[in-house]
Image (cartoon, rainbow, N blue to C red):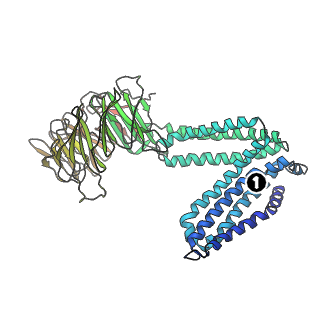
Amino acid sequence: MNAAILIATRELRDKTRLFLTALALAILPFIASVMPMLRQKGDPNLVVTIAGILAFSLGVGTSVILGATTIGRPLSDGRLSFYFSKPIAPASIWIGKATAALIATAASFAIVALPSWLYARGEWSQTWSPIMTSTLLGSLVVFFVMHAASTMVRSRSALLAIDFLLAAATVGAIFIMLRPFAFSGATRLLSILGLILGIGFVLVLAIAPAFQLAFGRTDRRRSHAALSKALWPGVAIVLLAGAAFVGWVVSATPDDLSGQIVVAQTPATGWTFISGRALHRADYQASFLIDPKGGIHRTGPMWWSAAFSRDGGSVAWAEPVNPLRPREMEIYTRDLTRDDARPVATGIRLPFGEFVLSDDGRRIAIDDGHTLSIHDLGAKRLLFSARLFEVSHHGNMFFVSPNLVRVIHAPWQTRAGRDERVTPVITEVDVARRTVTNTGTVEPVRTSLCVASPDGSRLLFSRNGLLVDGRTGATIARYGDIGMWPAILRDGTVVVQKKTTIAIQRPDSAIDVALPGKGSAYIRGEVAPGKIAVQHGGSILIIDARTGVIERTYAHMQGPLVTWSPVDPRPLPIDTGRPLIVREGRHFAFWNPKTGERTPLGIGQ
């Protein structure tokens, strides 16, 4: 260690000119700030800007030059043998020289930046402090990278081609590891993985030169070979550690999900889509398709949700196609009637938007906020596209028939509040006739989100309790202030939440069901003819909509969510004999609402 200190001290004495240059550069911002052509003499912003640019340039430039010459130049000039003629350990030589180079880089940077920081501390903290911190850390990395690159280039060895291939493979491996996080928008995980890889690579680059000097000594080619033998195995270990971390993150199962979980299911064929943040995995969004046998099929990141066809035979979702442009997505579909079916890329690109399948899954309608387009998935043909909305909007839509799409839309609400109102408009697009018709307007409501009757003939707006005609928007009934998840049953019964009660409005009677205990209530929908599921606290209540009697209570259970799409407002067709997905604690299971039987999910491919 004493030898390393002596070497570092000697090296720093040799860099006196560098420190004098830095001192001269530190004065330049103040000279520039008093030039005659300036209106404001000594402008702090000007001083800080010039000093920041000079400090950045000198810091990076010094790290590049010293990284390439600290060992590389003595090795090329044959002067490195001086150190090996003394009883000095090779590691001490590297530690001493590297420490001096890094101190010189940081010192030259500080000499330029410190006077302007003392002069205009506020401007530094607002603008340049993050940049300067990054510069210092970046200079550390640049120094070690330039040392390795200089050693390889100066050797003029054929090993350089192998180094190039290994470096390219390393970049490719990093890209592959980053893809799952980039496509899912997991910025925190990208930072964590970058930190793991960055620290690992810097440690390898910092340690490998000690082996270079120990086994390569003064011969350039031997030095290159020794550096490569230490460098690339170390890089491989870091890559394996990063790959293990990525593998652990993406291995999340449905039981690992936490927080707000999106569940969409189609009892017609028993398939379910589940998506949510994975527990202990920062901001990673995991998505799964669950088949009727309980098999778990991992998918790419499905933003928003999946759209099932009404017959349950198809599913569509959107995945980002470019990690640098996460809002650009492509529609994927899958045939749910075949166990061996694979996801199919449709080639349909869209910005961040909403979409819905026709009842038979053969067509898809896409609303990007301004333009509505309708595609034939089988023929891969665009059937209709037009800019229908002048301002970005939010609402619902569904296929009334294969050739007719109904859209309930309203401008985005810019402020939250009980007095903020929007006016939903009902528009129908006839694909066969290529016509667009505004069929009705709804009176102002607080939110354009609504649920529909199974046939789409009536709409019930959340929070507002306004029941209207599904085509004309004419008001049919008012239920006052209600919760966010009302329901219209197949027999026409309207079910809404009012504070601590569930209000059931039948054609011939009205029933208020008092909920036991405290806690929020959410109407999950009709799970059997005349039977509704209500999430109340941590339990599921089964209520007979004809009598208002709470028939059964399933404690410690969440779900089911008896809607299949955040866009199509119509309820699911049920009575298929297939169970629904629920969650008990952290575990998902199939649940039969008639018998209460629960079956754990299996693991599929």
The residue pinned by badge 1 equals 98
| Left or right for 71, reference 42 | right
State the residue at coordinates (10%, 43%).
509
Please say if 446 is above or below 250.
below
Q: Position of residue 435 (x, y in %)?
A: 21, 37
Q: Position of residue 460 (x, y in %)?
A: 19, 45
Relative to the observer, which residue lies in front, 51 or 38? 38
- Residue 214 figure quarter: top right
Decide if residue 91 is in sight here.
no
| Left or right for 107, reference 456 | right
| Left or right for 145, reference 220 | left
- Residue 491 figure quarter: top left
Q: Position of residue 318 (x, y in %)?
A: 39, 37
State the residue at coordinates (48%, 38%).
252
- Residue 587 figure quarter: top left
Q: Secondary structure at mark 1?
A: helix
Relative to the observer, which residue lies in front, 29 or 397? 29
Please say if 36 is above or below 246.
below
Which quadrant is the N terminus positioned in?
bottom right
Q: Residue furthest front?
A: 37
**Amino acid on which disc 1 is placed:** Ala
Decide if residue 496 is in sight here.
yes
